[in-house]
Amino acid sequence: MAGEIFSLIRMPIIAFLGGFLVVGGWIWAPKISDLVKSQFSGGPSVSMFADTNRIGRPETAPVVRSCIFKAVDVGPDASKMEPSAAYFILKAGSMQANISAMAGKSDRWSENQTINQANSWGQLASCIYALDDRELCDPDNRAAAVEATTKFFAYAKQTAGSTGKPAISADDARAIENIRDRLLLMLKNHRRYGTLVAADFGSFAPAEIMQVMRSEQKETRDICKR
């Protein structure tokens, strides 16, 4: 009986889903294209065209184990959760915020999502850079620093305000600006140490990052060779 019922409703369901995908694809294609472009400008998880010998897997990075729970609040379950799982929770939040952006949402909830993502990635990046400089000689650690920094600047840019978006509060803007200034200073230091180079951020990094990474510096060295 159940099989007969399923056979009756199967074709209408398939037809509905097919129509939804066709119509949805027609409507959403431009926005999906814009989202892909924005993701590239904000940096993918693994830097496009970066040297794979320098850039590893951020989710397995030792610095993520040290810092992720300072950026992601999972409550009392933190002691039971693998750091890599918490890292994926943070990335899932990024995906949700990106979907809201793709849908063109401009309400307070979606704006708070963007602010929270900027703060979380900024806190993770700040914690990573606060560790010993030579931690970034490890490819996985370097990948985590690159991704956290890139994600922060991508979301910070989204909070800057634009037509159709509610303005963020002065306190939120100040907090994000403070993280921004701190990370730019850290980037300058790590560029000088040789632990980070422009190529680590790939070809689609935010302009603020590339301006620092490509700037002229009189004194540079590679502390990873010691």
Image (cartoon, rainbow, N blue to C red):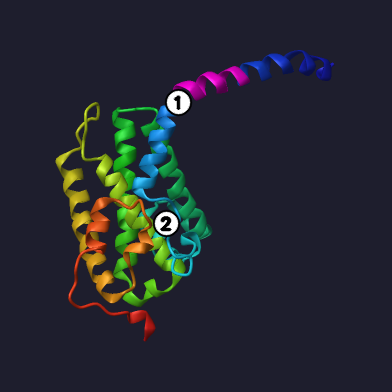
Tell me what residue is drawn at x 25 percent, y 40 percent: 159
Q: Dot 2: what SS? A: loop
Depth order, front residue of 39/114 = 39
Tell me what residue is drawn at x 25 percent, y 73 percent: 192
Where in the figure is residue 69, as x and y percent of width and height?
40, 58
- Residue 14 appears left or right of 34: right
Please report the bounds of the magenta region as a residue range.
18-28
Q: Residues within 10 Å of mark 1 (few under 14, many from 20)?
A: some
Depth order, front residue of 123/18 = 18
- The residue labelled by disc 2 is 47
Residue 155, picture quadrant: top left
- The residue labelled by disc 1 is 28
Where in the figure is residue 148, as x and y percent of width and height?
36, 56
Depth order, front residue of 212/97 = 212
Where in the figure is residue 53, as x and y percent of width and height?
48, 69
Residue 99, picture quadrant: top left
21 within the magenta span: yes
Where in the figure is residue 93, as x and y percent of width and height?
42, 43
Amino acid type at mark 1: Trp
Label 2 to label 1, Cα distance in Å? Answer: 26 Å
